[in-house]
């Protein structure tokens, strides 16, 4: 498993510059919808196909699933990888940040967050970086010129948090969540860019809280458990923070279907504790 996890990390890092360089010509819609009913861009399809090919051929990877396809692809014997090939792809038109998320589950999908053996993400910002968590440690890499270089071998959330970013329209926030926002916005600075990975990486860097909350119109929120919430929750927990679905760790959420959504709250422990108390 150790070698398989290393091979998965290396394959995602190796695919990142290709995904990035494939973006300029793929900003138009593909004319299709993903299983969550969202419009796909040509770039979403491109990144999904590239990652299926690269991850599916690794010895020890037995299943590939992604936000962009209905079912699980059988790729042999071994662990299951669940991928959000391009996170925040609506940021491609305005040329803003995006990411790629990967979760490595030692179980059949849909799986519990407790079945994750590793998870990580690539951030396509002004530079390309990767955060990868395994065995309780998060490592940050710079991906440049086809090479991964370790920037920080033990990433932890800063103790003194400074930023927050919350998704969903403000009038759609439930009253208890809106009350929590009133509370934290007097202490923290708003940083919201509309790509989970960009917003979460600010929290990982500066400390704070990210949420895509339960909405009045969508009690399950927007983000997907297998492809987004579990893997990113795992990274944040390995970095010393907390994840929550509003009641407890997002890793505790019962997996019921591949594309299920869940509210998600991520960040410094004290801020998530306060959030859960506010939602009680
Ligand atoms: O546009 P909104 O409602 O703020 O939603 C933004 C959220 O949706 C997402 O873009 C969904 O991810 P995808 O782009 O992978 O579908 C998240 O990255 C982000 O946190
Ligand atoms: Mg996403
Ligand atoms: Mg996506």
Image (cartoon, rainbow, N blue to C red):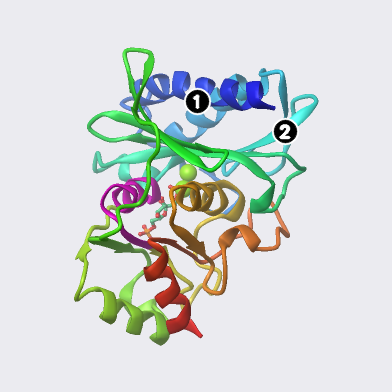
Q: Nearer the viewer, residue 151 or 64?
A: 151
Mark sitting on residue 218: none
Residue highlighted by disc 2 = 79
Residues under numbered marks 2 and 1 in contact, where contact means CB atoms less than 8 Å apart: no
Q: Vertically, is 12 above or below 177?
A: above
Query: x, y (%) of residue 192?
Result: 27, 57
Query: x, y (%) of residue 225?
Result: 59, 55
Q: Is 206 covered by the magenta stretch?
A: yes
Q: Quadrant of residue 37?
A: bottom right
Q: Is 167 covered by the magenta stretch?
A: no
Q: Vertically, is 96 above or below 77?
A: below
- In-image side of 215 versus 3 (left or right): left
Principal secondary structure, stretch drawn in magenta: helix
For mark 2, give the secondary structure.
Answer: strand
Give the residue displayed 49% in from the left and 47% down from the top. 238
Label 1 near ligand 3 (CB < 8 Å): no
Q: Nearer the viewer, residue 223 or 248?
A: 248
Give the residue displayed 46% in from the left and 82% down from the top. 277
Could you tell me which quadrant the N terminus lies in? top right
Q: Label 2 vs label 1: CA separation? A: 16 Å
For mark 1, give the secondary structure.
Answer: helix
Q: Is residue 101 visible?
A: no
Q: What crowding class fits label 2: few (fewer than 14 Cα within 10 Å), some (14-19), or many (20 or more)?
A: many
Q: Which residues are magenta?
A: 194-210
Q: What crowding class fits label 1: few (fewer than 14 Cα within 10 Å), some (14-19), or many (20 or more)?
A: many
Sequence order check, earlier mark of 2 and 1: 1
Residue highlighted by disc 1 = 12
Give the residue displayed 47% in from the left and 60% down from the top. 242
């Amino acid at each position: 498993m150790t070698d398989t996890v290393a091979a998965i990390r290396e394959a995602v890092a190796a695919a990142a510059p290709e995904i990035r360089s494939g973006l300029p010509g793929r900003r138009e819609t593909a004319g299709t919808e993903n299983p969550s009913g969202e419009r796909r861009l040509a770039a979403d399809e491109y990144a999904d196909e590239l990652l299926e090919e690269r991850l599916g051929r690794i010895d020890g990877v037995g299943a590939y699933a992604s936000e962009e396809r209905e079912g699980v692809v059988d790729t042999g014997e071994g662990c299951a990888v669940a991928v959000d090939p391009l996170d925040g792809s609506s940021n491609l038109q305005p040329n803003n940040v995006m990411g790629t998320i990967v979760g490595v589950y030692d179980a059949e999908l849909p799986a519990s967050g407790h079945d994750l053996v590793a998870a990580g993400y690539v951030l396509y910002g002004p530079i390309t970086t990767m955060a990868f968590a395994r065995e309780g440690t998060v490592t940050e890499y710079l991906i440049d010129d086809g090479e991964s270089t370790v920037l920080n071998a033990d990433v932890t959330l800063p103790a003194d948090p400074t930023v927050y970013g919350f998704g969903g329209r403000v009038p759609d926030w439930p009253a208890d969540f809106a009350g929590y926002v009133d509370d934290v916005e007097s202490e923290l600075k708003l940083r919201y860019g509309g790509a989970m990975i960009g917003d979460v990486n600010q929290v990982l860097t500066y400390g704070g809280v990210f949420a895509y909350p339960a909405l009045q119109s969508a009690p399950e929120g927007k983000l997907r458990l297998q492809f987004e919430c579990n893997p990113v929750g795992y990274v944040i927990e390995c970095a010393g923070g907390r994840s929550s679905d509003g009641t407890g760790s997002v890793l505790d959420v019962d997996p019921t279907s591949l594309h299920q959504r869940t509210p998600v709250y991520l960040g410094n422990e004290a801020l998530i504790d306060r959030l859960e108390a506010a939602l009680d």
